[in-house]
Image (spheres, grey):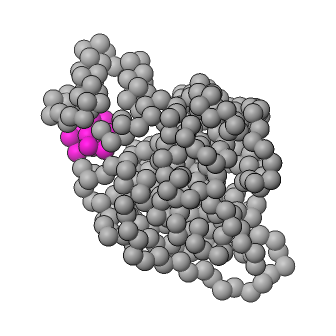
Amino acid sequence: MLRVLLLTLTLFAGLTQAAPQTTLQRPISLITEQGNLHGTLLRPQSAQPVPVALLIAGSGPTDRDGNNPAGGHNDSLKRLAQALAKHGIASVRYDKRGIAASRAATPDERDLSVEQYVADVAAWGHLLKADPAFSRLILIGHSEGALIASLAAPMAGADALVSIAGSSRPIDQVLREQLHYRLPPKLLAQSNRVLDSLLAGQTTEDVPDKLLVLFRPSVQPYLISLFRHDPSEAFARLQIPALIAQGSHDIQVGVADAQALKAAKPNAQLVIVESMNHALRIVPLDVQAQLASYNNARQPLARLLTERIVDFIAGIGTTPASSDALTSR
């Protein structure tokens, strides 16, 4: 288990102002045995404790703001943090170890694992739960981050969890499905052999050049750790309130995944956001529009997404979980 040595958490002193929900932003660092994890604390100025959300980014080199060098600059998590602050909810978003400002914590991706990411979330959670400035801790995971959140929630002492665009199936199954429609038969057969090897816990050097971006030897240990986990099983084990948010125009994770998560944990709330995609924007089912949204930080987030998250957090401990799924823009 990750041992926390030091937390740096400094806020602006500031003067009390009449304007509601003045927001304060400061760097926050979690220093661990393996190196520093760096993030951003954004919180409303308040004399009373406020809820705090720990935002957990998706797969690959996705940074604290939701940006990925290969996937575009859209500031999805940064925009979500700003929306939460306007409604009296603090947030911490951070660069995962090995990524961006936290790269030095694990510079070699061969040393990354789901279990280490889970331990990091637990460590952040313990410290935030111990801070008297915060009342409730909510884990908000996007895409692969939803799985990390589900696995970490018990250890982190989370009071609630939000899964945004989280898969319900083991990720090797998701990859097989995605590649089935994109690869020619010979290359598809080779990719399935690689996946079979990784699923069995064995790395392989027999990776075609065209598949190295997905299955390069240095990322295979992480994939082995990832394939060990079933997102639906992890979600079903949660004993805390949970919200499932899914866009109807998400071309990476489908509505069926959200419905399967709901079936795994029937008392979870479910919201299907009409026309929202994986970048949390309202876009048509058009390839060019989809791709453009992944690289457009100015495009607003889907309004219903932030509304339902805010309502969910406000209702923690006061209202029973709803079984209704809503659709809206």
In this rendering, the count of numbered labels is 0
Screen quadrant of the N terminus:
bottom left
Please identify the residue farthest to the right as the structure is shown. Answer: 18
- When the figure is inspected, residue 225 is found, relative to residue 35, above or below; the finding is above
For image coordinates 77% across by 32% down, the residue present is: 324
Q: Quadrant of residue 251?
A: top right
Which residue is at the front of the view, 305 or 285?
Answer: 305
Q: Position of residue 103 (x, y in %)?
A: 34, 62
Q: Identify the image quadrant of residue 281.
A: top right
Q: Residue at x 75, y 75 (%)?
A: 48
Residue 183 image point, x, y percent: 34, 19
138 lies above or below 253? below
Q: Main secondary structure of the magenta part?
A: helix
**Viewer-proximal residue among 192 and 72:** 192
Measured from the top left, where is residue 329 in percent x and y?
75, 37
Q: Residue at x 41, y 25 (%)?
A: 173
The answer to whether 47 is drawn above or below residue 125 in the figure is: below
Q: Percent position (x, y) of residue 105?
A: 32, 64
Q: Nearer the viewer, residue 188 or 199?
A: 199
Task: Answer whether residue 217 is magenta in the image.
Answer: yes
The stretch in magenta equals: 210-223
Q: Can residue 236 be found in the magenta stretch?
A: no
Is 306 on the left-hand or right-hand side of 32? Answer: right
